[in-house]
Image (spheres, grey):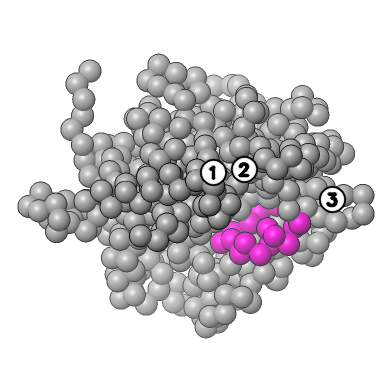
């Protein structure tokens, strides 16, 4: 047996920095709210941009407005959007309007006190709308790449290029990644199913799976400080991050750039010093930002700001859904039914609504948008099935034997060096089994959805994808009930009987 099969999933983690998590049941509008809309995507996006010309002054306005447009965007299908009538100019106009709308929304949030009544609904509805707007942009970027007949993935270099793939906040001068400043925070999205799952780490979905802290040294050289599941915390030249070729990247800049520089310098030196000993700071699977003996990717940023300036980052932290406590425990997060309500953490997407940071630029690889969108839809449904239908992952005997063999060989002198950068000593077999099973299930489902996507003349919307995924689940579950061996993915992921209270 080839031992490297065992670590393929860990290699594929890419910029996945955190364990996986849950999906609350209210992430999609209910069936009653999914009424058909006579507006197309262009009309909805431009209408929202016009509506934002009037400042939002109360949490009630914030909630009602954000909820209204979130529902409008979610209920649109590719057919009702009439996308084939748009040319590249129309598409760029829509993306520009969407990008500007997101910037305006973040500015309005600065004037709202989130300790007041209705603030919780406002917060969650804004995050949902920001997510929907980014999905709309992704959809349009994918469509535009089809019109332009783009096929060379190497043509797209992270944080370079022009609209609609590379959008820059007009308040900043930013030509490409060479204009990054010390203290900037990069949010990115990897290409694996683990990355899609990490983007859904808590109660609010996001589209980011990794955080990198930028540092510019006295000679002007740019570095990143970051934590990876495979190797722990490391410092690397900025080119290493660029070469990872992620699906999306967004640059955030803290309001006090001097403080941000000090925080990034502090973390750069701390991580570099530890690396010089030959042992990197281990990865924190427990996602406990209050204990820095181990670090997860977002914690690199929060520790820097807290240790240097006593600044708590982010303003609003991720909470977990009580429905997935067993799943989270399997991943190594130290919570139970009693403590889940009080536990919080820093998920990458939390930075989107921290108004002390400004969005500088956002970049996408158009050729990776379909894959990213499909993974998002699949993971959204998988988490919904876990929470509502008690679905759980279960590794087959083959996966388990591969994992245990890899775990043993990782500790043998001959293989130790060869596998050092593939998975860490503090990764338990149950975690690796879960990662491998997740990737297996995701790949099986994606292959089926791609068959349907290829029948369509334009990209399928999220609403359409969710419908297809539910139909696939029902058909495969019926096969599973007749014969487990004949099921497509229910062999690895199926509903378990709920334990009695």
Q: Is residue 382 magenta?
A: no
Element class at badge 2: strand
Q: Quadrant of the C terminus?
A: top left
Element class at badge 3: strand
- Tell whether 65 sits left or right of 450: right
Q: Which residue is mark 3?
A: 216
Q: Quadrant of the N terminus?
A: bottom left
Element class at badge 1: loop
Give the mark nearest the N terminus, 3 or 1: 3
Q: Which residue is mark 2?
A: 232
Name the mark nearer the viewer: 3 or 1: 1
Q: Which residue is mark 1?
A: 424
- Foreground residue, 8 or 194? 8
Residue 436: x and y in percent read 38, 51
Please say whether residue 214 is visible from this viewpoint: yes
Give the mark nearest the N terminus, 3 or 2: 3
């Amino acid at each position: 047996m080839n031992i490297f099969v065992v670590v393929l999933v860990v290699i594929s983690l890419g910029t996945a920095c955190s364990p996986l998590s849950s999906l609350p049941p209210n992430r999609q509008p209910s069936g009653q709210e999914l009424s058909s809309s006579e507006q197309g995507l262009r009309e909805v996006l431009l209408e929202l941009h016009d509506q934002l010309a009037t400042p939002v002054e109360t949490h009630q306005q914030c909630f009602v407005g954000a909820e209204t447009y979130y529902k409008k965007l979610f209920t649109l299908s590719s057919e009702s959007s009439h996308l084939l009538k748009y040319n590249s100019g129309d598409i760029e106009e829509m993306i520009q309007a969407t990008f500007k709308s997101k910037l305006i929304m973040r500015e309005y949030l600065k004037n709202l006190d989130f300790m007041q009544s209705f603030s919780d609904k406002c917060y969650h509805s804004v995050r949902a709308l920001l997510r929907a707007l980014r999905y709309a942009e992704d959809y349009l970027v994918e469509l535009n790449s089809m019109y332009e007949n783009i096929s060379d993935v190497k043509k797209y270099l992270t944080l370079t290029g022009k609209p609609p793939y590379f959008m820059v906040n007009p308040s900043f001068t930013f030509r490409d990644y060479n204009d990054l400043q010390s203290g900037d925070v990069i949010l990115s999205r990897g290409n694996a199913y683990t990355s899609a799952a990490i983007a859904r780490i808590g109660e609010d979905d996001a589209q980011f799976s990794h955080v990198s802290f930028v540092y510019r040294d006295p000679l002007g050289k740019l570095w990143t400080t970051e934590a990876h599941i495979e190797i722990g915390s490391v410092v690397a030249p900025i080119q290493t991050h660029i070469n990872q070729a992620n699906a999306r990247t967004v640059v955030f800049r803290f309001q006090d750039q001097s403080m941000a520089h000090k925080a990034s310098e502090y973390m750069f030196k701390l991580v570099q010093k530890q690396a010089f000993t030959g042992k990197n700071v281990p990865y924190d699977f427990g996602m406990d930002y209050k204990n820095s003996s181990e670090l997860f990717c977002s914690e690199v940023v929060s520790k820097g700001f807290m240790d240097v300036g006593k600044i708590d980052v982010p303003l609003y932290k991720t909470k977990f859904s009580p429905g997935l406590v067993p799943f989270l425990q399997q991943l190594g997060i130290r919570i139970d039914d009693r403590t889940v309500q009080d536990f919080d953490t820093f998920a990458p997407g939390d930075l989107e609504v921290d108004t002390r940071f400004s969005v500088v630029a956002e970049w996408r690889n158009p050729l990776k948008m379909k894959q990213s969108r499909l993974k998002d839809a699949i993971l959204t449904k998988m988490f919904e099935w876990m929470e509502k239908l008690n679905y759980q992952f279960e590794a087959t005997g083959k996966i388990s034997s591969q994992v245990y063999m890899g775990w043993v060989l990782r500790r043998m002198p001959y293989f130790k060096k060869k596998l050092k950068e593939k998975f860490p000593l503090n990764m338990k077999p149950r975690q690796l089994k879960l990662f491998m099973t997740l990737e297996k299930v995701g790949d099986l489902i994606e292959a089926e959805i791609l068959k349907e996507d290829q029948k369509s003349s334009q990209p399928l919307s999220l609403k359409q994808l969710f419908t297809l995924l539910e139909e696939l689940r029902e058909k495969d579950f019926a096969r599973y009930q007749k014969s487990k061996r004949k099921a497509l993915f229910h062999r690895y992921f199926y509903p378990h009987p709920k334990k009695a209270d």
